Structure formats: structure tokens, C-alpha cells
Image: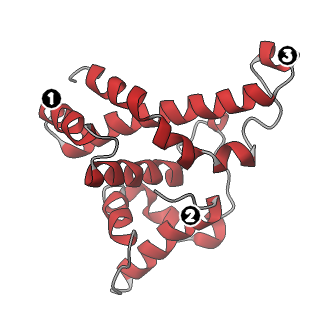
Amino acid sequence: MYGPSRDQARALFFETWRRWRDGLPLEGMQAVALEAILAHPEYHGVLSDPARHLERDYPPEAGETNPFLHLALHVALAEQLATDQPPGIRAAFDALLARRRERHAAEHAAIDCLAEMVWRAQRAALRRRASPAQRRSYNPPGWAANQAARSSISRWVRFAAKPFMIALFRLPAL
């Protein structure tokens, strides 16, 4: 797992989509990213217009899903499954897939758990830096835009493995 900046991560998706549409060969992570992109046609318009969407924010209070975060979570899960890191994640996902019976639905259930773990890590990191009064309000400054929290996501995801796997095993069949 690597820790790109927000713009680098978005550039991966923009470039992957452009290369695929132009019939050019994909490189490295682009093949994994393309699988996620093709599974989400609702994001194709966003990926076709990098000038408009590279810098765009997707605050949770706006009620929109961040397409880049969503695609990145698919890529992160694919990396974890490919390497079975943390150990046992592949078996946990296979069990989830057997219950869900559709790969994309199983991936969404798994990345929902992963997204929750990332959110908790961001929240905890910001709370540790907040003053006591801010901790009580659960609203530390810079919550939505704190670059340090954003850049720590990829590092933290590696340490979130155990709670993530526990959450995977507890997912109900739908």
C-alpha cells in the first residue's frame, strides 16, 4: 500500500480512465483501478472531466459520495485480498462473498467496514490534537480538511486490520 496525496490518488483514476478510453496499455495499479472504475459507471462523467473534478471537495454534509474515496477503497480492498494482508482477510472476504453471492455487493459491504475504520481513525487523530473543550464538542477544528489526518489514512488502514476483519465476519447476509 502506498500513501499518495489526494491529487496523486485522483490522478491515478483520471489517467487510468483516459488510457482505457484511448485504448492505451495500463501500468501498475491502473489495472486494479480500472476494475473499480468499470464497476461504477456513475463515476465515468467525473473521471472524464479532470479539470472540473481534480480539486473538488465532497464534504459529507453535502450528501454526496466522494467518488475518489469510494474507488480508492475498492483498490485498497483489492490490494488486501491479493496479498492476504492482513492474514486471513481473503478467507473472511470469501465467507462474505458466499453469503452475499455477488462480488460487487460483497466488496461494498467490506469497504463500508473499511470506511468506518478510516473515519474512526481520522476522528481519533483529530481528537488527540484537540483541546479539552473541543474534545467535549466532538468538533475539533479542521475536521473535514485536516491534511495530516488525510495523509495518515493509508498508514492507519494497515493497523485497522483486526477490527476490520472482525467487522467483516459480523456482517449480516442481505
Residue named by callout 3: 132
User: First in sequence: mark 3 or mark 2?
Assistant: 2
Question: Which labelled disc corresponds to residue 10?
Answer: 2
13 lies left or right of 49? left
User: First in sequence: mark 1 or mark 3?
Assistant: 1
Q: How far apart are marks 2 and 1 (CA)?
A: 32 Å
Comparing marks 1 and 3, which lies closer to the viewer?
3
The residue located at (17%, 37%) in the rendering is: 97
The image quadrant that residue 64 belongs to is top right
Element class at badge 2: helix
> The residue under label 2 is which amino acid type?
Arg
Q: How far apart are marks 3 and 2 (CA)?
A: 35 Å
Q: Is residue 163 above or below residue 46?
A: above
Element class at badge 1: helix
Of the pair 115 and 57, the residue shown nearer to us = 115
Density class for disc 3 (Cα within 10 Å; few <14, some 14-19, many ≥20) is few
> The residue under label 1 is which amino acid type?
Arg
Quarter of the N terminus within the rendering: bottom left
Question: Which labelled disc corresponds to residue 99?
Answer: 1
The image quadrant that residue 11 belongs to is bottom right
Q: How far apart are marks 1 and 3 (CA)?
A: 44 Å
Element class at badge 3: helix
